[in-house]
Image (cartoon, grey):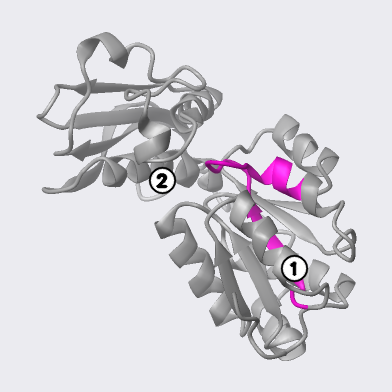
Amino acid sequence: MPDFVVGDRTRLIQALLNLVSNAVKFTDTGSVTVRMLREDEDETGVRIRFEVVDTGIGIAPDVLATLFSPFSQADSSTSRRYGGTGLGLAITRRLAQLMGGDAGAESQPGAGSTFWFTARLAKPVADCAEPAAHIPENAGDAVRRRFAGCRILLVEDEPVNQLVAEENLLEFGLAVDIAPDGVEALDMLARATPDTYALILMDMQMPRMDGLAATRALRQMPGFSGIPVIAMTANAFMEDRTRCLDAGMSDFLAKPVDPAVMGGVLLQWLPHASAGRPTTRPEF
């Protein structure tokens, strides 16, 4: 593999984690292996194949061809057992195509699966440096110094995503309550007071009630019309950002969420909140 390549780091990680998340979800025993292979290379760039190999339940041949279509799932009842809407693979393929590659899968029922995507990445020119992200310097330290103890409501259905986001928020010195979907979030808000939460982090794709519907509903609740609501989603396209803002959300974090970027967004929006200052944890 080349020592350095030039590409979209965030989208590469997003596509890879989409595949890893599915592999872990559908593999009760055995292993999940992630690997990268160099497919071809010339003077200007290299095409890399990213593979996620699992020993999970596998997929029947007749449904493999439909998996990368929006809203398709190998198991039509998967939203009941596993959650999700089937958008992740379609997004992965779209991201791969935008990066000059493609995505696909090979599988046998009961024998595991291999999901892959490719991306063509450029070779760096001399003295090429990655531009700095447009985030405040030491945003995490600023959040800890200025807003330690403020309470955040995290609305997220995936246990792994819950854990990662919660750990990031705790690192910023914030208190965290978790709701697994929009229905539970609205119930928690109905039993809370308007000054309980300083900010809400809201996943877009959830069972029972998604983040867009939940945000529209909470904006109608007395006292919650002005609370910052930050969307967290793997849907990284501009139309998805527009949908979030149209639903009443305040800002947008693309998954996988970079802790430094999260810190910058929190630092931007926590000053807009008059609620969520350190108080006794609400009883739910």
What is the three-letter code of the residue carrying label 2?
Leu
Quadrant for residue 133, please give it: bottom right
Near-viewer residue (156 or 139): 156
Quadrant placement of the N terminus: top left
Instruction: Give me the C-alpha separation between circle 1 and circle 2.
Output: 26 Å
- State the image coordinates of residue 227 (x, y, percent, origin top left): 83, 64
Does the CB distance between marks 1 and 2 fall below 8 Å?
no
For this view, does 145 lie left or right of residue 283? right
Say how many tags the image has: 2
Quadrant placement of the C terminus: bottom right
What is the three-letter code of the residue carrying label 1?
Leu
Near-viewer residue (235 or 247): 247
User: Which residue is pictured at 27% across the width and 35% down the height?
Assistant: 51
User: Which residue is pictured at 18% across the width and 47% down the height?
Assistant: 28
Image position of 244 with respect to 142: above or below: above
Near-viewer residue (92 or 220): 220
Does the magenta run of residues contain 199? yes
Tell me the number on the disc at residue 74: none
* Residue that badge 2 annotates: 17
* Residue that badge 1 annotates: 199
Specify start and end residues of the magenta stretch as a single range.
196-215
User: Which residue is pictured at 67% across the width and 86% down the height?
Assistant: 144
- State the image coordinates of residue 255 (x, y, percent, origin top left): 55, 49
Crowding at mark 1 (Cα within 10 Å: few <14, some 14-19, many 20+): many
Which badge, 1 or 2, is on the more N-terminal residue? Answer: 2
Residue 126 in view of the camera: yes
Image position of 143 with respect to 145: above or below: above
